[in-house]
Image (cartoon, grey):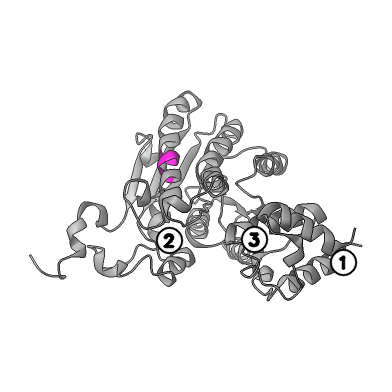
Amino acid sequence: MKPMQGKLALITGSGRGIGKAIALKLASQGCDIVVNYFRRREAAEQTAEELKQLGVKTLLVKANMGDSGKIRDMFDTISSEFGYLDIFIGNAASGVGRPIMEIDEKAWDWTLGINAKALLLCAQRAAGLMDGRNGKIVAISSLGSQFVWPTYAAVGVSKAALEAVTRYLSIEFVPKGIAVNAVSASAVDTEALKFYIREGLVKDVKQTTPVGRMVTPEDVANAVAFLCSEDAYMIRGQTIIVDGGTSVAPWSSVIEKGDS
Amino acid sequence: MTVEEQIKDIVSRIAHIDKSIMERESTFKEMKADSLDVVQALVAVEEQFDIEIPDEEAQKFRNFGDFVDFVQQEVEKKG
C-alpha cells in the first residue's frame, strides 16, 4: 500500500508548474488530488489526465483565489464530493511586476489577495474538513519574501505575509492536529520564470546557484511531500528553503565556479 | 444591450478606458490596458455571461473584435 493511499489533497494552481509537480508527487504516493486552476483550462485537464493514469481519484475545480466567493464555492464542492481533506497546498500565485512607484492599489490588492489572503481563507475552510485526520498545510513562498528582486515588491511583500500567516496558523492549528509549514524556492524552472527571463529581470540563474543547476518544480515537490509526511511531525511554522544554496552563498554570483 | 456593448461597459469600468476608443481592430495595448486589466476584464466577462474564456483561447485574440466574437460564440453555444 502506498503511504498516502486514501488521503485527499487540494493543490491550488496545480494545472501547471510547481503545483502540477506537487500533484504528481503526492499522487505517486497514492494520494487523491483536487486540481484547482484559474485561467489555463487545457493545462489543468492535461494534469488531471496524467493524475488519473497514476490510478488516483481526481477532481478538477476552477476557482480564482483572489475571489473569496469562489474559494467558498471550491470548498463547498470538495465538501459535497468527498466530505474530507487531508492535505492543503497553497500554491496558486499571481502578481504584478512593477517598480514600487508604479504599484497602484488595484495591483497591490490583487497580488496580496491571491498570494496571502487566500492562504488564510483556504486554511480556515480546509481545517473544517481535516477534523481528526492529522491534516497538513503547506504554503508555497519565494525568496522574494526576504530578498529584493527588481519589480518584485508586491509579490515579495505578499510572500512575506504568507510566511507570517503560516507561522500563526501553525500554532493556532496545533489543537486541531494540523501541521502547517511553507516551502520557499529561488527561481524555479517554470513558465513563470521564462517570463522574467524574457523581460530581462532574471539572468544566469544556473551560474549563481551553488549546486550548479536550476531548482526544478520536482525539487519543490519533494520538500512539500516530506512536510506532508509524518516524518515531518515536529516541524511547525517553518519556511523550508529549496534553492540549491543560493541564499546562504550570495557571493556565488561574483566568483567563477571552482574558485576557492 | 448587445454582447459587444456589455463587454465595452465591463472593460471600460475595469480598465478605465473610454468606450469611444474601443474599436474592433484595437489591441488591448493600444487601449492602454495592462495585463492585470485584461485578466480582470476576462474574469468579469466570464461572470457576466456565465462562460469560460481560458488563457489558451484569450492568447489567440489579435484585437478587441476577436474577443467580442469569441464571447458571442460562447453565448450562442449556451443557447
Q: Are marks 3 and 1 on the same chain?
A: yes
Amino acid under disc 1? Lys
Q: Nearer the viewer, mark 3 or mark 2?
A: 3
Res. A155 visible in picture = no
Residue range highlighted in magenta: A159-163
> How far apart, in angstroms, are the residues tagged by discs 3 and 2?
28 Å
Mark 3 touches mark 2? (CB < 8 Å): no
Tag 2 subunit: A
Give the dominant element type of the magenta stretch: helix, strand or loop.
Answer: helix
Amino acid under disc 2? Pro
Task: Give the quarter of the image for residue A55.
Answer: bottom right
> How far apart, in angstroms, are the residues tagged by discs 2 and 1?
38 Å
Query: Could you say which is closer to the camera, residue A208 or residue B37?
Result: B37
Q: Residue at x 69, y 40 (%)?
A: A69
The secondary element bearing badge 1 is classed as helix
Where is mark 1, residue-wise?
B77
Res. A79 visible in picture = yes
* Residue A217 tag number: 2
Amino acid under disc 3? Val
Task: Give the quarter of the image for residue A67.
Answer: top right
Where is mark 3, residue-wise?
B38
Lower position in the chain sequence, tag 3 or tag 1 = 3
Query: Could you say which is closer to the camera, residue A59 or residue A186?
Result: A186
> How far apart, in angstroms, are the residues tagged by discs 3 and 1?
23 Å
Q: Are marks 2 and 1 on the same chain?
A: no
Residue A160 colored in magenta in the image: yes
Residue B38: give x, y in percent of width and height.
64, 61
